[in-house]
Amino acid sequence: MTLAHWWIFVCATFLVSAMPGPNMLHIMTRAMRHGVARATFAMAGCMLALLTLFGLSAAGMSALLSALPQLLGIIKVGGAAYLIWVGIKAWRDRGTPVDVGPNTGNAAIDPQASAGQLFRGGYLISIANPKALIFAAAFFPQFIDASAPKAPQFAILLATFAVIETAWYFTYALGGRSLSGLLREMRWQRRFNRATGALFVGFGLSLLAWRR
């Protein structure tokens, strides 16, 4: 892998990661509800899921999907169903009273959510998106030079991706924190929950309509 190829990977990853999708929306909502510090558990879950997908890519998942196209269909339907379920759950959430700290801007809407729950939610949102699997299986291997040792190249690309993706996680989380003051009022909570619910349902329906 040449330096020029690595820079292409950096630019492509930067643009792809910047695009709003289920991961970024989920992290933004976690930051709005729980603050940036606690949202890091959701970020860790999303990142682990993506690293899992890249690991599957390195193990030859792209070849498996080509040999068993019906497997992708099962993954797609399952992932879409989960995203739609998350959307419906958010839409039906009526909200709860919020105490927003005057200096931190962090909203603790759901104090019962543990670090494990936040981590698990992030992991499930990320792993449920089959587009991420295809991105890992089809895009990532293109930057691996087959004539050179693969392990060091894989490590460099993985580290690069993790740094860029994490930077965008915090960008979206900080944006969510700046909006958290709106959640003082129940009516804004309900509007926000319905907006995010509709977006998640939209993500799920787009997966069902998506063709590889």
Image (spheres, helix red, strand yellow):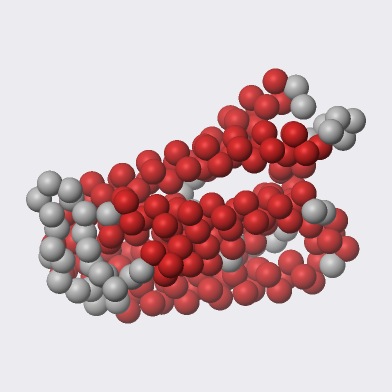
Which residue appears at 13% of the width and 54% of the height? Answer: 101
Residue 81 coordinates in the image, percent (x, y)? 56, 75
- Residue 148, image x, y percentages: 86, 30
51 displayed left or right of 64: left
Q: Image quadrant of residue 13? A: top right
Please give the name of the residue rendered at 64% of the width and 61% of the height, measured from the top-left corner.
130
Q: To which quarter of the image does residue 207 belong?
A: bottom right
Q: Is residue 203 visible?
A: no
Q: Is residue 173 above or below residue 164?
A: below
Query: 64 left or right of 96?
Result: right
Q: Quadrant of the C terminus?
A: bottom right
Give the farthest residue toward the left. 102
Tell me, yes or no, if residue 140 can be seen here: yes
Q: In the picture, which quadrant includes the N terminus?
A: top right
Q: Is residue 69 above or below residue 32?
A: below
Q: Position of residue 140 (x, y in %)?
A: 71, 42
Q: State whether residue 3 is above or below residue 41.
A: above
In this rendering, position of residue 77 left or right of residue 94: right
